[in-house]
Amino acid sequence: MAGDALNHASMTLTEQLPILQVLVPFVAAPLIVFIGSRALAWPIAFASSVASFVIASLLLGQVINGDVISYHIGGWAPPLGIEYRVDATNAFVLLLISGISSVVLPFARASLSVELPPRKHTLFYALFTLCLTGLLGVVITGDAFNVFVFLEISSLSTYVLIAQGASRDKRALSSAYNYLIMGTIGATFFVIGIGFLYMTTGTLNMADLAVRLEGQGNNRTVQAAFAFIVVGIGLKAAIYPLHFWLPNAYTFAPSVVTAFLAATATKMAIYVLLRFMFTVFQPAFVDGGITLEVIILPFAIMAMFAASLSAIFQRDLKRMLAYSSVAQIGYMLLGITFLSETGLMATIVHLFNHGITKAALFMGVGCYVMQAGGGFYSQLSGAGKTMPWTSAAVVVAALSLVGIPGTAGFISKWLLIEAALDRGWWFVALLVVASSLLAVIYVWRLIEALYLGQPAEGATTQEVPLGMLVPLWIMAGACVYFGFDTDITLSASRSAAQGLLSGSVAVH
């Protein structure tokens, strides 16, 4: 009898995993403020993040073979009620976001001691947890308007998190303000697009939208909705040339904030773009228009080259990595334009691989800021000798950024080239290789400063605390691990790509 009750309780808990994915960090954020204890703020934030990661892992295990979980909020069945819908695509992104958060938070303890006054730490962790809630909510919800709500929750907390960098550099305030303006414009475009869809179909549930939009490819209202949504999310994702808010936001935010956002926020926006393009509007709608080959493809290629060229000429490591992120987003968009299983696999795998790579690199910057006082190459001169463990991890992640064989970055670029050749676009495959060579140049500038430059006179080995080194090496190690063991990434991305290409079939 007791065993039956235990089984029933565990089954019930398993059924509640989708809502717990969002509820755990959502409750943690106000709890941190209510308790108001600086000593308890970090443990609460970290515990909620780890719980979210465990939940995401369990959800991915349930859907990695192509299954779909539908959770009805309050017992109200969709389309009237709000639905949380989990498939391989968003479970994979949930795993990335919660995993990055769980690794970055231990790093934050030591990093914030240098970059933020102690009196601000409690509210910082509350905002961090609220941002995590918004990102997870955007990804897991199956309701179009709910996407907008969670998008604003994550964005509002992000603006304040970026502004915290003003403790070291007042330019963080103008960067946060610029991001606020651009983010608000993007959110406005997005919600106008949602409004057009509601006007046409009378529903906000994504699965129901997919059914009701079938055969409406020539409807001008639907076409306008698609345009507004793509532009709105394009701003949030920093798609070239809508990226101008990103370099300053990443450069002047506290290092831990940049590490978290670079690895998660733009990836969440790319996920939303994929979800609306393929689940709501359907592959036939996307393929039937000029959006991919005439608009997105040229901008993806321009991002790969223009942002990489900008990165080459930067003297600040943070700003260089920010422009590199814009270029890497170009690779993700390029995978979408192939409209093939391999192309979408490349996008989804690169979304994951770039997330872990950038988390490692920006945590490395945080280590340099702590010991050298900044991230300019002149300040990093000879850091390979004075901070050997930090510099080694940064180099490993930088090689992944380039796409060197044996690293995670190589897998996604190989898939991109394979997808281009499958389509017969050999010239695009050559462009992928050429843009990767540009990445070699700006990565070499970093390695040159670290290992060929001379340390400042009297400089001694001053490695960062283990609390920062361990998270950094976890991410650097992941860059190598996922370069060899591709079972999880490729199986999850293949299942996700098949689900997206099947369109409304996956949501019935």
Image (cartoon, rainbow, N blue to C red):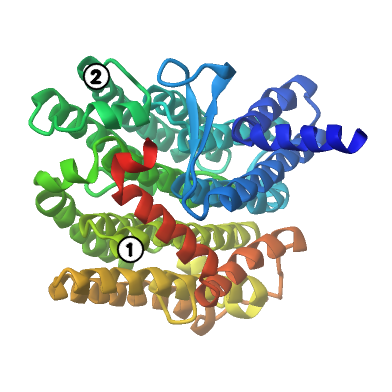
From the top left corner, tell me how far across and down residue 339 is, in percent. 22, 56
Pick whichever of labels 1 and 2 is earlier in the sequence: 2
Measured along the vertical axis of the image, is residue 144 above or below residue 62? above
Q: Amino acid at mark 2?
A: Thr
Disc ID at residue 138: none
Q: Residues within 10 Å of mark 1 (few under 14, many from 20)?
A: many
Image quarter in which the N terminus is found: top right
How many marks can you see? 2
Residue under label 2: 201
Horizontal side of residue 493 vs 450, given as left or right: left
Which corner quadrant of the image does residue 303 belong to?
A: bottom left
**As rendered, which of 248 and 42 lies closer to the eye?**
42
Q: Give the secondary structure at mark 2.
A: helix
Residue under label 1: 311
Which corner quadrant of the image does residue 231 belong to?
A: top left
Seen at 21% across and 29% down, the residue is: 213
Q: Residues within 10 Å of mark 2 (few under 14, many from 20)?
A: some
